[in-house]
Every structure is written in C-alpha cells, then in structure tokens.
Amino acid sequence: MRLLAKHRRNPSEVGVSVHQRKDDDGKTISNECEVVVVSADQDNLLDAITRALTSLKGSILDADVMTTCDGVTLDRFVVRGTFLSSERQTELKNRIEDNLFRLSLESDPDTLSLQSHQDDKQKFTLSMIHQNEVKSDWQLNISEIKLGKSIGTGRSGHTFESYWRGTRVAVKVVDCSKHSQQMAQEILNEFQREITIVSKLRHPNIVLFLGATICPPRYCLVFEYMANGTLGDLINSRKALLDFFQIAKDIAMGMNYLHLCSVIHRDLKSGNILIDSHGLIKVSDFGLSCLVDNGSTSDLTAETGTYRWMAPEVIRHEPYSSKADVYSFGIVLWEIIAKDQPFRGMTPIQAAFAVARQHARPALPKHTPAKLAEFVEYCWHQDPQRRPAFSDIIEAIPLIKSSLKKRDFRHLSFLGS
C-alpha cells in the first residue's frame, strides 16, 4: 500500500487512507467508510485516533488491527461519516497528530505504556511457504473450484460457498489485484502464514483444510463446509436452547490441540467458531495465528485480534502467551450465557480502554450460578498466570455441569439438564 511505503520513508508521520464501504454483493454502503491509520507504535495512539474521528463526527462501528513484519501498526476502523475527500483525510491526520502531542503532555507517569512492536511475525512462520513453493499434496487446480454465494467477509478477502470435485466446500479468496502493492504483500503474508499453520492441523474440533490454489493475483484456501454457520449467528438467532457445556468442551478440545501444537490463535471469538451439519463445533480462521518456537512467547507484544475479545496484556502490548486465548475463551463463554455482544453500548476502542485500564469485564447475568460465574472469571482473570490451561478447562467442564440444578439450566436456556 502507498500508505505503508510513505510511512517507511517518514516513520514519524501518521498515515491515513479512506475507502468507501461495500457489502458482500459489492454495492456501496451509504455514509460508511473504512479508515486505515498507519503509524509506529506509541503511547495514546488509539485514544488519539478515537478522539480525532469523534471530533469530526465519525461514529466508530468496528475496528481491528494488523501488524506488519517490521512493526508498523495498521488500525482499521469502520466508520459512519464522511471522510472520503482529501481535505477530510488531511484534517483527520492533523487532528490525530495534534491529539498525540497533547496527550503526550498530559500523560500520567503511572499509565501503562505500550511497548514497541517486536518482530513476532518471525515467530509465527517457522516454515513460511513462498507462493511459488506450494506442496503438491495440497495444491488444487483452481479450474475445479466453482464459486457460489458469498458467506463471509474478512480482513483480507471473501469466503464463498463453493464446490470442488462434487463436494460442497468453503473457499476463502484473496484477490491481490484489488490492493496496492504494499497492502497486497501484507495480505499475502497473512495468507502464507495461515497455510503454514492449517496445513499441519488435523483435529475433530478444527475446521479441516483441504488445499489451496496459487494463481496470482488470486489465492484461495479451501476448507470443509460448515453448514450451520458461526456460533455468533446461533447466539444472535435465539431460536434454540444452547448446549453450553458441549459447545464449551468442543472449543476447549480444539484450543487445547492448538496449544499442544504450539499455535496461539489470537482471534478466538464467536464469529470464528463454526458449526457443522451435525452440530459439532470447530475453531476456524487462523490468519492471525502464530507458531511459537520452543514454547517461547517473550517476543510476542504486537496488538493482534478483535478488541472486544482481546486480552488486556495484548491491548497494552505487553508480552503475552497462549493464555491470551484463554481470556478470549472466557468472553465467548460470556456470550453464550448472556446471549449478547460483549461490551454492548461501547465502541470497540472504548471496550479496549476499559479492559486494559480499568480491568472491566462484561457483566454476567444475575441468574448465573456461582460455580459457572467463577469458572468464567477464572478464564478471563487479569493475571494471565492465574488463567487455566485448556487441558484444565476440559476437566472442569463436567464438574461444573454436575453442580448445576435443573432450574439453572432452565433460567440459562441451556440444554442438558
């Protein structure tokens, strides 16, 4: 992306790029845009961006982050408001830089500082695969893939319900021709990293990778098709009782396997947990995942994931470990119990600040049984060392289930009493 190239020429400068939002059918969404801010990591960056957008009458609808291999932060915001003109983008850039300067003068010495990015992408990719070195046992012929309707949109591309050799599959498509050279390279790095990880994974609670196609500028990842959508969709539908303990066990089994394979997911949330036609739960989307070499996690500091599910140590750019996934698991448990969005009423940035600075957590419903509440709070404990391993979680789930009474299942709208 030109924005990244410009930043590398002048690392002290904040870069801003704005694009009109489009829906899954490619139609323009009125009065919504994607704002990407590129900057070197520094104290109060999120606060400065949020204040600048708000002061220009922008309403933040969603946000996420990507970190380049040389430690540059790309914060992406979905914003309701008008920011497309060059004048508005310049004004936004100036306000962000002004806010950074003012906030640096006001900074409290006791405030937790954000550590500079380390090159943790080297840790993700122990065996990075170049696009021209695709293993023959999982290389597919793109002519055999028949794309159908779009069933999802992510940071780097679209996912389609498709057919491959008569089998219904899900195909994640990345088209680098739609991006500038620098951005295309960052997206391609994510694609390569995901292949490196998913091609090694085989577990009943991990979405099965079937192969990939490498036909520049189009790249595809092919997975088994999950007919019943995401856990988030199931929670939001409120159409059926939820088998809380089976769902929790399935997720924990998949995550325990990942951690035993030295993989940290880093974006565990209900939207990345899929359900097959038989109701089996599977963990998916490994675009932000990383491989940890020999169990070492001291170099992982980059803010990565989705803010509402992100562990406080990740938000603060402190060193983190696989226990960051356990925190996210705790938020997913809360979603199933409360049947709501975490931190509803807050923007993603407000939620991140509340978690990192005020130790905030979404409030559990009043009817949550004490043992279940204690279990969730144990998972999202402020101290990562106090959070359980997924192997311990698997052992705890049946014990917690046995402690509940029939009325608890009824009040929680859970199956399994």
Image: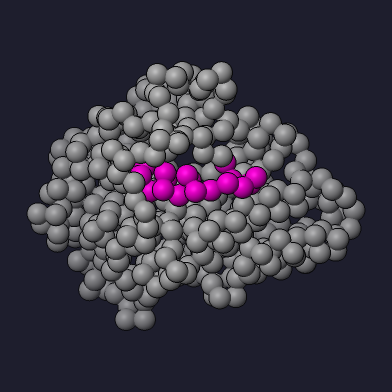
Examine the image and state in which quarter residue 331 appears: bottom right
Q: Residue at x 44, y 19 (%)?
A: 144
322 inside magenta stretch: no
Q: Residue at x 26, y 60 (%)?
A: 71
Quadrant in which the N terminus is drawn: top left
Q: Residue most toward the front?
A: 136
Residue 58 in sight: no
Instruction: In this rendered view, identify the residue nearer to me: 239 or 330.
Output: 330
Instruction: In this rendered view, identify the residue nearer to me: 77 or 401.
Output: 401
Q: Residue most toward the right?
A: 406
In this view, 7 is above or below 354: above
Instruction: In this rendered view, identify the residue nearer to me: 44 or 174.
Output: 174
Is residue 253 toward the left or the right of residue 120 in the image? right
Query: Picture coordinates of residue 248 (x, y %)?
Result: 69, 53
Q: Residue most toward the bottom?
A: 109
Examine the image and state in which quarter residue 135 appears: top left
Q: Residue most toward the left?
A: 9
Q: Residue at x 57, y 23 (%)?
A: 168
Query: Picture coordinates of residue 66 (x, y %)?
Result: 34, 51
204 inside magenta stretch: yes
Examine the image and state in which quarter residue 207 appears: top right
Query: Picture coordinates of residue 297 (x, y %)?
Result: 43, 69
Query: Picture coordinates of residue 372 (x, y %)?
Result: 75, 62
In this view, 295 is above or below 28: below
Is residue 106 toward the left or the right of residue 13 in the image? right
Is residue 266 toward the left or the right of residue 417 in the image? left
The stretch in magenta equals 190-207
Residue 146 in sight: yes
Colouring method of the image: one colour
